[in-house]
Image: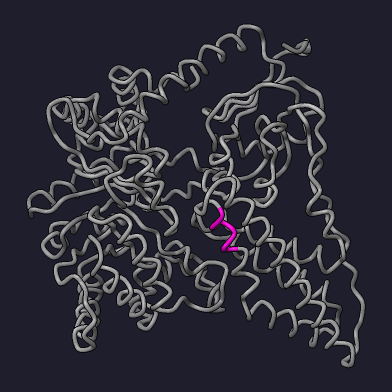
């Protein structure tokens, strides 16, 4: 073991994005310096040459990304390689090129400056979104536009430069782009920690596939740490510990050995059902965002897809995906997972996201604006293309449709009316689809929970989107650091809305699922089941842990926990009781968590 400096142990808390523990010397990568963008006047006669330079840079960038994608495909498989499809879509976006050309023509400026201005607007739009997943795509946009800009400036070599490591090290930096992460050498990179980023970023996804421990969201750690410091990186709890004591090193050594053994136990459960000790079967599904993720669903032992987010098809482009393009994606998922169910959520974009796609005017409050089902009911052609594509895909698999952000009966009836209209079109065209295709709604607005009895008479299932349900119920933007502490999944009001929804569903003979983050938290799973939830859907890597705790509990005990929660006035007390219960029945699941 290397000599450990005596400066004293320090702990930096971030976001755990890739499990594992490693230790070694830190290598701090300097934050990428802002590239100096020249700005000069160009005449009309020079514009064709400037446009040609842009086209050449786009071609060069395409070749580079395809090479990165090829290497990732060989090393990590098609699912991870598909991450770079979003980068390629940016290069194929005619509106991006047109905006750059218009800027050059209007302002009489060189292509580097025009591209820098236009691409910055794209990134700022994505950065401002209220959806975690979509906001993370700003990192992809920065990655590809930076590559284009470097190619315009003749600096392609700077993009490919890798950190020179003379020994295995823990990388600490402000940020890592997906393309740079894909090129990390596992023999020399023990793990990495970044100031920014989250669990849904493509950098985080690649880290998990590479099986490199990673922590993000450390804020300013890259500025406070120095090369050569000895550290321990805890990808389970999101910790970077510098100058760890002998006691800390010993404890983590024990933890790592236990975790390896426990992961083996989880893998053994892959083909086992999620059934409680008293014989109650729980449907355990997975959330996916791309057709390429079907392999993860089966690999982690899920029963199907409880939430297929379709927004990915609309990202990083200015033209809407065609019906045929959507059909191909839905068809692939449905056929590969048949006969398991695939619940496809219709487009769930917000008002500010539509601005990025359609150049509509921005909204003062996109949280309460034109988003999700409201957009679809207003933009009928958009909705028509998606519903027809889903219906066509239902002919080859167990497909279900789920409408997001339903606030009441009127919206549901409008959506169902349009669905019936498009079914009629397909019948006339002789196109097959599943006549028995089931319809469900997401319960993520308090108004929907309070009218659940009316909604339940007209659908086959509910799926609780707990992320938005909590935010709307408590008026809390969890991404706002000044009030994020108020975001409380165990708030009594939230739990009563869940109970109200589940009771309404059961009274009308339909089932209730949860597809928000609560469904992937083993501490909250017993509480959800006790409240009457029948199905849980979480990110594929979280499925094994959820299955483990389901198989260790009795539903009668979960109902007792829920009864306590419904009679308790304090969210913190409810959480404490839920933690105590979960740790008592599944201690191995929590041994990687900090004490």
Q: Quadrant of the N terminus?
A: top right
Q: Residue at x 57, y 50 (%)?
A: 202
Main SS of residues in magenta: helix
Tell me where residue 453 sits by quadrant: bottom left
**Residue 449: percent from left, percent from top:** 23, 54
Give the residue displayed 61% in from the left and 11% down from the top: 248
* Residue 303 horizontal/vertical position (percent): 27, 45
Q: Quadrant of residue 310?
A: bottom left
Residue 103 higher or lower than 519, as above or below: below
Q: Position of residue 460 (x, y in %)?
A: 15, 59
Looking at the image, residue 488 sits to the left or right of residue 401; the answer is right
State the colouring used for the structure image.
Answer: one colour
Compare residues 50 and 55 and report the one nearer the observer.
55
**Residue at image location 92% in from the left, 77% down from the top:** 40
Q: Is residue 568 above or below residue 539?
A: above
Residue projecting furthest to the front: 74
484 is higher (above) or lower (below) than 87? above
**Residue at position x 30%, y 28% in the image:** 548
Q: Is residue 220 above or below residue 159?
A: above
Q: Which residues are magenta?
A: 81-86
Does the magenta segment cover residue 312? no
Residue 83 highlighted magenta (yes or no): yes
């Amino acid at each position: 073991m290397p000599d450990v400096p005596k400066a004293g142990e320090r702990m930096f808390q971030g976001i755990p994005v890739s499990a594992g523990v490693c230790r070694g010397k830190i290598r701090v990568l300097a934050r990428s310096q802002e590239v100096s963008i020249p700005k000069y006047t160009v005449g009309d006669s020079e514009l064709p040459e400037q446009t040609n330079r842009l086209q050449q840079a786009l071609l060069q960038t395409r070749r580079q990304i395809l090479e990165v994608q090829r290497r990732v495909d060989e090393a990590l498989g098609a699912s991870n390689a598909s991450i770079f499809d979003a980068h390629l879509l940016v290069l194929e976006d005619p509106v991006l090129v047109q905006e750059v050309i218009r800027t050059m023509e209007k302002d009489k400026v060189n292509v580097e400056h025009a591209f820098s201005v236009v691409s910055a607007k794209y990134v700022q739009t994505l950065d401002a979104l209220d959806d975690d997943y979509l906001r993370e795509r700003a990192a992809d946009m920065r990655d590809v536009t930076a590559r284009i800009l470097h190619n315009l400036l003749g600096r392609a070599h700077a993009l490919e430069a890798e950190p020179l490591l003379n020994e295995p090290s823990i990388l600490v930096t402000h940020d890592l782009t997906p393309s740079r992460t894909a090129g990390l050498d596992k023999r020399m990179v023990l793990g990495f920690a970044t100031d920014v980023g989250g669990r849904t970023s493509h950098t985080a996804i690649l880290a998990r596939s590479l099986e490199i421990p990673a922590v993000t969201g450390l804020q300013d750690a890259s500025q406070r740490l120095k090369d050569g410091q000895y550290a321990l990186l805890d990808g389970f709890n999101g910790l970077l510990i510098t100058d760890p004591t002998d006691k800390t090193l010993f404890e983590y050594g024990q933890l790592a050995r236990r975790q390896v053994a426990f992961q083996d136990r989880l893998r053994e459960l892959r083909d086992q059902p999620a059934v409680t000790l008293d014989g109650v079967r729980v449907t355990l599904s997975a959330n996916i965002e791309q057709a390429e993720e079907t392999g993860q669903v089966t690999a982690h032992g899920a029963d199907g897809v409880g939430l297929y987010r379709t927004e990915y098809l609309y990202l990083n482009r200015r033209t809407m995906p065609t019906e045929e393009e959507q059909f191909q994606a839905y068809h692939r998922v449905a056929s590969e997972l048949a006969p398991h169910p695939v619940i496809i959520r219709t487009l769930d974009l917000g008002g500010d996201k539509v601005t990025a796609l359609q150049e509509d005017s921005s909204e003062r409050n996109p949280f309460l604006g034109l988003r999700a089902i409201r957009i679809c009911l207003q933009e009928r052609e958009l909705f028509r293309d998606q519903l027809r594509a889903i219906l066509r895909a239902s002919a080859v698999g167990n497909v279900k449709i789920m409408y997001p952000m339903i606030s009441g009966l009127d919206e549901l009836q409008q959506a169902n009316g349009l669905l019936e209209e498009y079914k009629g079109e397909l019948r006339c065209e002789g196109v097959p689809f599943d006549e028995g295709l089931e319809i469900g709604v997401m319960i993520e607005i308090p108004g929907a929970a309070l009218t659940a009895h009316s909604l339940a008479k007209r659908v086959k299932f509910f799926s609780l989107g707990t992320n938005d349900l909590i935010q709307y119920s408590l008026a809390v933007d969890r991404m706002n650091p000044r009030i994020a502490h108020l975001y409380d999944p165990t708030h009594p009001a939230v739990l009563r809305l869940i109970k109200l929804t589940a009771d309404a569903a059961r009274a009308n003979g339909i089932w209730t699922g949860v597809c928000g983050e609560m469904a992937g938290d083993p501490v909250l799973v017993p509480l959800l089941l006790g409240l009457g939830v029948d199905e849980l859907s979480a990110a594929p890597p979280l499925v094994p842990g959820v299955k483990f705790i389901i198989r260790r509990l009795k539903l009668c005990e979960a109902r007792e926990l829920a009864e306590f929660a419904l009679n308790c006035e304090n969210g913190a007390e409810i959480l404490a009781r839920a933690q105590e219960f979960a740790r008592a029945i599944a201690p191995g699941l929590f041994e990687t968590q900090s004490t």
